[in-house]
Amino acid sequence: MSKIEDIKNDIMRISKKDICIMEVCGTHTMSIARTGIRSILPQNIKIISGPGCPVCVTPSGEIHAAMQLAKNDKFMIATFGDMLKVPSGDDFLQNYKNVKVIYSPLDSLKLAKQNPDKEIIFLGIGFETTAPLIASTIKTADHNKLNNFSVLCMHKIVPPAIEIILKNNTDKKVGGLILPGHVSAITGRKYFDFIKKYKISGVVSGFEATDIMSTICLLVKFYESDKFDIVNNYKGVVSEHGNKIALDMMNEVFDIQDSQWRGIGLIKGSGLTIRNKYKKYDAADKFNIVIENIPDPKGCRCGEVLMAKTTPKDCTLFGKACTPSNPVGPCMVSSEGTCAAFYKYDL
Amino acid sequence: MLVFPLVRVFYEVIMCLAVPVKVIELMMDNRVKVDAGGATLEVSNMLMPNTKLGDYVLVHAGFVIEKISEEEAKDNIGLWSEINQK
Amino acid sequence: MNSKHITMNFGSGGREMHQFINSYIVEKLKNGVLEKLDDAAVLNNFPNKRIAMTTDSYVVSPIFFEGGDIGKLCICGTVNDLATSGAKPYAISLAFILEEGVNIESLRKIIDSISDTANEAGVKIVTGDTKVVEKGKGDLIYINTCGIGFIDEGIDISTHNAKTGDLVIITGPIGNHEVAMMKSRGMIDFDIKIKSDVAPLNKKIEMLLSNTKTIHTIKDPTRGGLASALNEICEHSNCGIRLIEENISIDRGVQAVCDLVGFDPLYLANEGKFMIICPKSDQKHVLEVFGPFSKVIGEVFEDEKKKLTILTKSGGVRKLGMLETVQLPRIC
């Protein structure tokens, strides 16, 4: 705790101006909430959440499409656990018996081998940390000539969402970014250099309280001295250029496309699609899946929360109509959702 | 009747959770055994094929995704002191 | 008994059932009362004390798990519940709901467990019942118990009694039962050594209460874990509680599983731990009885918002709400 005390004292010494720091990654949202860091920081430093929760940004129409597939006994839907309780209207994936929760996407290949009479469809959700894993899984399926497996590809990438926020940051509300540690482990620090053109700092951070506090200290230092840079504060894990094998695999299997973000809308060049070479593993293509445009529930402000325009407490549904056991929007139910973090941990 | 799914499943697995672990065994078919300081598991090294015995690595959803420094490993208090006591 | 499996006939109240009860259940559990096999057990020599009564149903799956089984669990759960009121367990009723087809050998093992645990806890099984449901209408074995115990003069222990300034003590590391259940269901592929902490704690409470009569609250943090149980206490006692994260012990296997899958150990079930809330002057008695694994993990203070909060290892403070959604079904 004394290391944190030292960093806190540094911050107190340097920090004069009001600053709003955005944490981009859902895992940071939870770490910050769980460690209670907000309660240690001085009042002039605010931490707000950004769009880094892959479950939260998956459009209702895509969840709905997954549910339609789950109704068909020919299919088995394999998914990460967080997807089970994300609402689409009044419905949830966990209501369907053809849905199986798995720990690793490779488990869906095992399911395919064990159930040759069914098609196993994996719900491909996640950012750059997860996409290479699905790419590797697709390549393995291809190598093993597996025919009853496919992926409903809903992967997105982080930079275009950050750009939208920073383009709208003309009032300089956001003074610095805590950059995702695990995405950066795959992509490398350099991936975030584009942020420099917005004259704002970004610091790649780990997830322990000391990592986050020292990251905040760096961001405050930059802000106070009117300087900006993209810095790696997670050097034990993140390199300059990332995991080349993972990135190559991701590029081999996926191409970039425009993508809908729940509550935000269309963001150009922000999604991944399976390339032609591996099209036979693209569930949307294989089964002519049409994604409907389903509007978000009335009163739900998840989109604004994800774009750092508002906090959960400003949403009239928060804690009343919208709770973890009765979620209206995804931010309340995802394990990395901002609203879930506020509800569970905030004083 | 409560029926549990056929394969290893998890009731609530967090997607972006990557955990630092130590490589304790190299296995066949691109798999390695890792120690998470109290739990051992087998994961794929397809994204980090040069993973070596004794490496400290980050594991995410059944894959090794990056090597981590010993210092970073040691900063994970408790986890590392347990592993290194072995 | 000829059949290796329970049949519908077994539940009919006829010869087969009587044979099994006499040859096995009574043999194992006889205590001067049970073997009369009357429809109601007549209990004599009641002390002139307040009576505590509890009931529970056990639907745990699987019925045999790492560190225990449904038999051990049902006795421990019952005597521990009685102990939370400061009562000495006296007698337990035992009702089985068996699924047609369940293995007789499994049933014998469960009865053995019940016998061993009842002896350890010093409590009698005085009456019982057996029903059989058709295959598919149950899940091997369900058990219901009802337990009664007696409370000594001067003891007043309740979740409504926590007072400002009281200490919150946990009697050992948390989360073991729920992680053991996950392991037993084959839900985790990780290779870990883990056992349920299921154990009868009534004798330890008896020892504690022979040394001090000023314990305010005893609660076993079962479903929903430490956090849910303490939230309940805050609500009932109109108080706030502040925990200290650093002081809460978690076995490394449990912590590793929690790290890997994102469970919060503060919400995981325990079946062999107590939280004891008492004045500071009682701390030494509690630690003496429960040994070196017991720790002071927090304090009660005045708070009209009745919040449970935790001082994290990094020096921050956060809320600990009630468990909102099920982490794992049917763990007890």
Image (cartoon, rainbow, N blue to C red):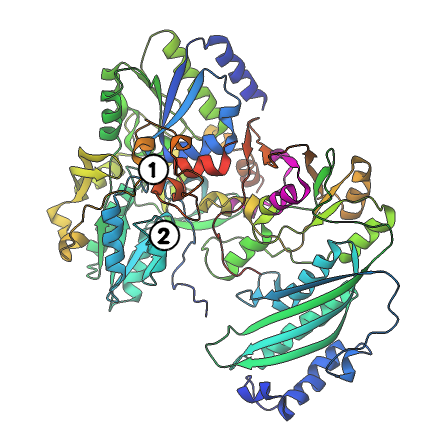
Q: Which mark is residue A84?
A: 2
Secondary element type, mark 1: loop
Residue drawn at x 32%, y 35% as measured from the top left? A301
Dominant secondary structure of the magenta stretch?
helix
- The C terminus of chain C appears in which quarter of the rendering? bottom right
In the picture of the structure, the residue carrying the numbered disc 1 is A53
Q: Amino acid at mark 1?
A: Cys
Q: Position of residue A52 (x, y in %)?
A: 33, 34
> Which is nearer the N-term, disc 1 or disc 2?
1
- The N terminus of chain C appears in which quarter of the rendering? bottom right
Furthest toward the left, the residue is A276
Q: Which residues are magenta?
A: C229-256
Q: Position of residue B60 (x, y in %)?
A: 37, 43
> Which residue occupies the foreground of this view, C98 or C183?
C98
> Which residue occupies the foreground of this view, A227 or A253?
A227
Residue C42 visible? The answer is yes
- State whether residue A76 is above or below residue C283: below
- Asked if badge 1 and badge 2 are on a common chain, one would say yes
Task: Please say whether residue C173 is one of the residues in the magenta stretch.
Answer: no
Q: Position of residue A288 (x, y in %)?
A: 13, 55
Residue B57 visible? The answer is no
Distance CA(mark 1)–CA(mark 2):
15 Å
Residue drawn at x 19%, y 61% as measured from the top left? A147
Residue A220 quadrant: top left
